[in-house]
Image (tube, rainbow, N blue to C red):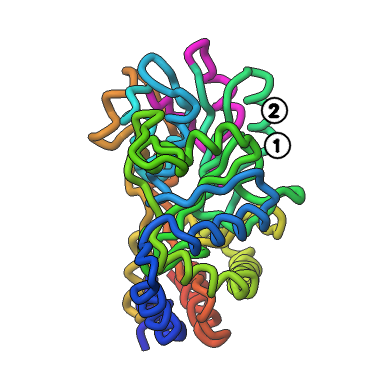
Amino acid sequence: MTLPFFPTDLFDDDREELLDIVRMVGLAPEQKFILGVHTARFEQVIRDSVGAADAIACGSGTSALMLVLRAMDVGAGDEVIVPAFGCAPLAAAPALLGATPVFADIDPWTMVVDPAEVARLITPRTKVIMPAHMFSVMADMPALRRIATDAGVRLLEDSAVAQGGTLAGTPAGRWGDAGVYSFVQVKTFGMPGEGGMVVTGDRELGSVVRMLRNHGQDGKSRFLYHRVGYNSRFDEIMAAFQLYRFPTLSARLERRARIGEYYTGRFAELAGCGVLAPPPARDGRCYYVYSLLSERRDELRDHLAAQGIGSHVYYRAPLPRQPAFVGYTRPGDAWPAAESAARRTLAIPIYPHLTDEQVERIADAVCRFAKES
């Protein structure tokens, strides 16, 4: 039996409810398909769940990053410090606003940005520090919060993969001046569509983001544009679907965490065999993806594939080595930990409806590779 890395049946159990929601929204007298009552309720639920002052639903996690940076007045001449290892929007969001992404190296084990590297890179042009949580580990937000406060710069927390995670009692997304979630299909609170959310404790910042997502309108007077904005609006069908699924989110997150903890326990003895699991812990974990570091990454991938187990290589090159972003680097710049991660990281399945037997099968296959190869 094949165990895919990206499952195709994430929403099978919700199919009838989704069809009912499509009918409900499609046949409603108001014929409101974006930014309606369901979106407003969804924003309220997320806002209250993390104790934010405001939550703004938008078209994607990527556009959410850009909206917040724009609301922070990031533009030409500004620098935004981002991790050297991660997804393209980390660098693209500031670059599209005319700012310069400055790449900080990562911790070689956790693969989140190294606070010491962030502190080293701050200059008078630094406007925002933008860390990202990675795979199953949250960034060191207490240290980054101190660095941002001491430097007098804004802190934008890319929590696209970390919704539901907490660190020292504070939810992911709430350590910074603003945080961002993504609802793309395979995320911890994914949906069969595209969408994102900005959460913030700064009501004024939230108000600007809210205007920017809808062409600069304030929601009170249509066709009155207060700012040059974007089209990054949220779908009513998806809002209603997420409201339906929200009460079961905590159970799905707990299942992910239990699978991750089982893996970490099984893999603890493999470090001497060239396979390194994430650090053991429950605090500061999010378990969106469970990623190993293997000295023979491609061989491990092939070994798992031969046994019908899917895996996935995230980010085969650091961001500053990507053709799109190499122009933002300087000769002699180096990111050794990011380069190492790009060579060694391999993610294995961790979605919540894996059975105990399937999880054990995956762990057995990894252990056999490490011990017998």
Q: Which span of residues is magenta-colored?
A: 100-125
Seen from the viewer's position, the closer of residues 25 and 160 is 25
Q: Is residue 160 magenta?
A: no
Height in image: 67 above or below 295? above
Look at 41% across and 29% down and name the residue there: 226
Q: Report helix, strand or loop for mark 1.
A: helix
Q: Nearer the viewer, residue 145 or 108?
A: 145
Q: Position of residue 10 (x, y in %)?
A: 43, 77
Residue 111 visible: no
Q: Amino acid at mark 1?
A: Pro
Q: Which residue is pictured at 48% across the width and 38% down the height?
A: 209
Q: Amino acid at mark 2?
A: Arg
Element on which disc 2 rests? helix
Residue where numbered disc 2 is placed: 146
At label 1, counting other C-alpha atoms closer than 10 Å, the crowd grade (few under 14, some 14-19, many 20 or more) is few
Relative image position of residue 138 (x, y in whole percent): 60, 48
- Residue 276 vs residue 80, the one in the foreground: 80
- The answer to whether mark 1 and mark 2 are in CB contact below 8 A is yes
Which residue matches tag 1? 142
Residue plotted at (48% across, 75% down): 368
Above or below 185: residue 140: above
Determine the residue positioned at 33% across, 60% down. 298
Residue 256: quarter of image: bottom right
Q: x, y (%) of residue 251?
A: 63, 75
User: Which quadrant is home to the C terminus?
Assistant: bottom left
